[in-house]
């Protein structure tokens, strides 16, 4: 079942089966949805095929990537149970309340999505409660994923990432590190992750700028003059992950992800490899009965023809301020209270 929130500026659509945000678009002539990514059931990992397929912006809760072998045998899906099961939903004007009980993960998740009354800004709050009698390792990763037509050869990604690595080299990440946006493929070819043209299927992971109290990431399509962005507390999500999947001629999917996870592996492998990388933990811990809440803002904005990318983002005093590469400031004033909880 799909539910929508809308105002005069935009439409946001959420799929209750899997809990994903599957559509976030402006109400203009283009009607472009940056979150048009959708797997079919056949494209899903075998241990996920009895549940919801990945689509749009889905939530990885409990884990990021593969479970351990014994966990798979006991029915745990990749990327956590929450993205695989039905969520309960209730709507009140511009606010959608959602809940998922992931019994195998031992997590109860309560989410609210609030849409600004006038502009294309949403605030998402998610509270994770460990309903098991034992504490556990866990991870949370937000997984917004871009697809055509918003994703095209010209699409540009900017963020406040710093040092990072290719997940293909996770076992020796410290010796094979990069500084965003410059990276290398498995043949040693250098390229930029702002607008990659190398046909290299990969996941690159980076630490959010330690000198900033917030994390941010934007994706911009010059073809459509359309900007999608996310802003969050760095303390909630200190990692940024950039996934790219190509066919022979073009990039089909691009993940602009952020979360607590540092290594895209089952927990036993994470523990055997590195509990910290570049000064950041590679997993989180939640005690028995503990509740942890994490929040983020998302926006979509129609740019002018002179826009070429995002230089920086700040959020305070009821306003998201986007500094452009041209040294201009775009201000998105919002009445959503969450913005004042973000550190300046």
Image: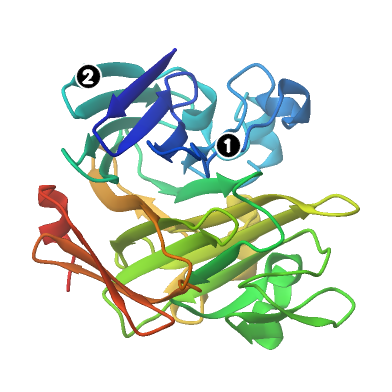
Residue 322: give x, y in percent of width and height.
31, 70
Foreground of the two, 244 or 333: 333
What residue sits 81% from the left and 74% below the top? 185
Among the two numbered marks 1 and 2 on one chain, the one whose residue lies closer to the N terminus: 1
Q: Is residue 262 visible?
A: no
What residue sits 65% from the left and 57% below the top? 243
Scheme of colours in the image:
rainbow
Mark 1 closeness class: few <14, some 14–19, many ≥20 residues within 10 Å:
many
Mark 2 closeness class: few <14, some 14–19, many ≥20 residues within 10 Å:
some
Whether residue 30 sits left or right of residue 124 in the image: it is right
> Splitting the image into 4 quarters, where does residue 193 fall?
bottom right
Task: Look at the image and tell me in which quarter the N terminus lies.
Answer: top left
Mark 2 highlights which residue? 91
Q: Is residue 4 visible?
A: yes
Q: Nearer the viewer, mark 1 or mark 2?
A: 1
> Splitting the image into 4 quarters, where does residue 244 fall?
bottom right
Foreground of the two, 283 or 240: 240
Task: Look at the image and tell me in which quarter the C terminus lies.
Answer: bottom left
At mark 1, the secondary structure is loop
How far apart marks 1 and 2 lie (CA) works out to 23 Å
Residue furthest out toward the top: 1
Mark 1 highlights which residue? 36
| Residue 207 drawn above or below residue 293 | below
Residue 151: give x, y in percent of width and height.
64, 51
| Residue 287 drawn above or below residue 315 | above
| Residue 248 drawn above or below residue 210 | above
At mark 2, the secondary structure is strand
What residue sits 10% from the left and 49% below the top? 337
């Amino acid at each position: 079942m799909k539910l929508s929130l809308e105002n005069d500026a935009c439409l946001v659509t959420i799929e209750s089966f899997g809990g994903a945000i599957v559509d976030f678009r402006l109400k203009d002539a283009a009607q472009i949805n940056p979150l048009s990514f959708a797997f079919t059931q056949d494209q899903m990992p075998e241990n996920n095929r009895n549940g919801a397929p990945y689509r749009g912006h889905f939530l990885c809760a409990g884990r990021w990537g593969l479970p351990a072998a014994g966990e798979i045998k006991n029915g745990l899906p990749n990327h956590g149970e929450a993205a695989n099961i039905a969520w309960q939903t209730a709507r009140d004007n511009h606010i959608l309340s959602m809940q998922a009980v992931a019994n195998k993960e031992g997590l109860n998740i309560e989410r609210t999505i609030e849409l600004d009354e006038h502009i294309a800004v949403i605030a998402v709050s998610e509270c994770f409660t460990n309903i098991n009698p034992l504490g556990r390792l866990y991870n949370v990763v937000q997984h917004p994923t871009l697809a055509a037509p918003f994703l095209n050869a010209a699409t540009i990604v900017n963020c406040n990432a710093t040092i990072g690595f290719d997940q293909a080299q996770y076992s020796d990440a410290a010796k094979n590190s990069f500084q965003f946006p410059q990276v290398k493929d498995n043949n040693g070819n250098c390229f930029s992750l702002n607008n990659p043209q190398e046909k290299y299927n990969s996941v690159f992971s980076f630490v959010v700028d330690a000198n900033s109290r917030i994390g941010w990431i934007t994706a911009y399509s010059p073809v459509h003059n359309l900007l999608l962005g996310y802003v969050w507390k760095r303390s909630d999500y200190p990692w940024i992950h950039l996934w790219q999947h190509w066919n022979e001629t073009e990039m089909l999917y691009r993940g602009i992800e952020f979360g607590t996870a540092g290594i895209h592996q089952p927990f036993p492998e994470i523990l055997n490899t590195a509990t910290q990388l570049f000064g950041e933990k590679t997993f989180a811990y939640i005690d028995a009965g503990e509740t942890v809440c994490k929040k983020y803002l998302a926006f979509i904005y129609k740019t002018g023809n002179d826009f070429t990318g995002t230089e920086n983002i700040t959020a305070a005093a009821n306003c998201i301020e986007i500094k452009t590469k041209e040294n201009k400031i775009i201000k998105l004033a919002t009445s959503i209270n969450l913005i004042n909880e973000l550190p300046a």
